[in-house]
Image (tube, rainbow, N blue to C red):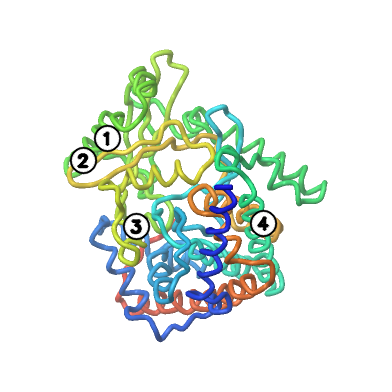
Amino acid sequence: MAGSVAIEESVAVGRAAREIVPRRTLAEWDRPHRSCSALGILFSQHAERDPDLLPIRYGRMSASPWTYLRGAAAVMAADLALSPNTGLTVQLCGDAHVLNYGLWASPERNLTFDLRDFDETLPGPFEWDVKRLAASLVVCAWENGLPDETADAAVTSAITSYRTHMRDYAKMSELDIWYDRIDASTPLASLDSRDRKEVRALIAKQARKRTSLGAFRKMTEVRDGRRQITENPPFRTHLDRPENSEEAEIARQVFETYTASVPEQLTRLLSRFTLSDVVRQVVGVGSVGMRVYLLLAEGRSGEAPLFLQVKQAGTSVYEPHLGPSVQDNHGHRVVLGQHLMQSATDLFTGWTRLEGHDYYVRQFRDMKIIPEGRQIAPYLTEFAGSCAHALAKAHARTGDPVAITAYIGKGRAFTRGIEEFARAYARQTHADHADLVVAIADGQVETAPGW
């Protein structure tokens, strides 16, 4: 009886949200409502970043509208906040674009498909993640020369998948939702047999290579009798110059202090490893300028290299619009969001704070298979459905799937709204990218080779 009452209440909440945000209004996008230019928002992020790396950031963002979208999460967050939201709160990924999904190894060493990036995670309205995924599908399609019909089909596939799986989660118990996993075979199921075989072989190859041992073989060398990470300036460099000695020490202290945030059994495991080398990394697009380090630790046996990535965590781009995080450490915010949204999380995740900066730690490579746009382009419609399945699972774990299902409904109103928004925001992304290119040409923005 109590269960049926709760379900009825959730249905009522979801339907009431239609009065706040009618589903047809999800399509609306109106640039003149912006109170700040896209460039102004990007410039406002400079305070948290290393100024020496900003030219690389803009070099990457200026390469194409697609790379611009990846680096402009703060711009889209501000744009989403211009309209009323449903109030149907979930743990937002915050940057749910189509390439922020991939395969991970569970602690049992099984590959699972899930979200992969949580730097901007924060509780917020579910539709904001859905809109970012949908817009990214259109931009990704255009980037790879796919016709408008394919872009539209990919968005429709994503929204249909999200709605279908959210409806399924609405019928499941809390524990069943929490234990649900999307294994590696699920994204392959919608492919034809020939494509499935080809992609399965690629996954198996990447899973073997993308491990700490694989990175150890490819990215290290013995120099002066000591095992070191190889350099690739300016994207991977040692911190052995006097002016960088403080950064090198911070990275080493993170390795020692972050263990306070992990379970005691992992602390004991880490005590068997000795830190061998540290380099500074430049990673991603939106993350460029934040402090990122790659650490090599070696086990006593000499047979167990471990690569850990230390990444500075700043304020989520959604906090100016949704309020500050309840976690007082942004590294904690990121790691908690990851644990909440992923079915199986990297064993080594943790966080700490040093010299006024928050950091989180994770394995650098743990059978992580992250696709590239050109790789998924031939299967974009099918891949979009798998991404939306993972997003629905994450939202069902952290929100109310019954209320979300009631809001979405059975018709096409929600789907049409998101489809129209995706096309409009993709056009806006192209316009914003063009503005950045002009600013670079005018000398307002300095760039450096990004890749």
> Which residue ends up furthest to the front in the rendered image?
1
Q: Quadrant of residue 300?
A: top left
Determine the residue positioned at 41% across, 66% down.
Answer: 72
Tag nearer the camera, 4 or 1: 4
Closest to the observer, 367 or 238: 367
Residue 109 against residue 70 in the figure, above or below: above
Determine the residue positioned at 61% across, 56% down.
Answer: 388
Spot occupied by residue 86 in the image (x, y as percentages of width and height): 47, 68
Q: Badges 3 and 1: C-beta atoms under 8 Å apart?
A: no
Q: Earlier in the sequence, mark 3 or mark 4?
A: 3
Spot occupied by residue 296 in the image (x, y as percentages of width and height): 37, 30
Badge 4 is on which residue?
A: 385
Badge 3 is on which residue?
A: 316
Badge 1 is on which residue?
A: 254
In terms of secondary structure, where does tag 1 sit? helix
Tag nearer the camera, 2 or 4: 4
In terms of secondary structure, where does tag 2 sit? strand
> Which residue ends up furthest to the bottom in the rendered image?
32
Q: Badges 2 and 4: C-beta atoms under 8 Å apart?
A: no
For the C terminus, the image quarter is: bottom left
Give the amino acid at mark 2: Leu
In terms of secondary structure, where does tag 4 sit? helix
User: Is residue 371 at least partly visible in the picture?
Assistant: no
Badge 2 is on which residue?
A: 354
Closest to the observer, 401 or 180: 401
Q: Badges 3 and 2: C-beta atoms under 8 Å apart?
A: no
Distance (Cα) linking label 4 and label 1: 38 Å
Distance (Cα) linking label 3 and label 2: 19 Å
Spot occupied by residue 244 in the image (x, y as percentages of width and height): 21, 43
Q: Earlier in the sequence, mark 4 or mark 1?
A: 1
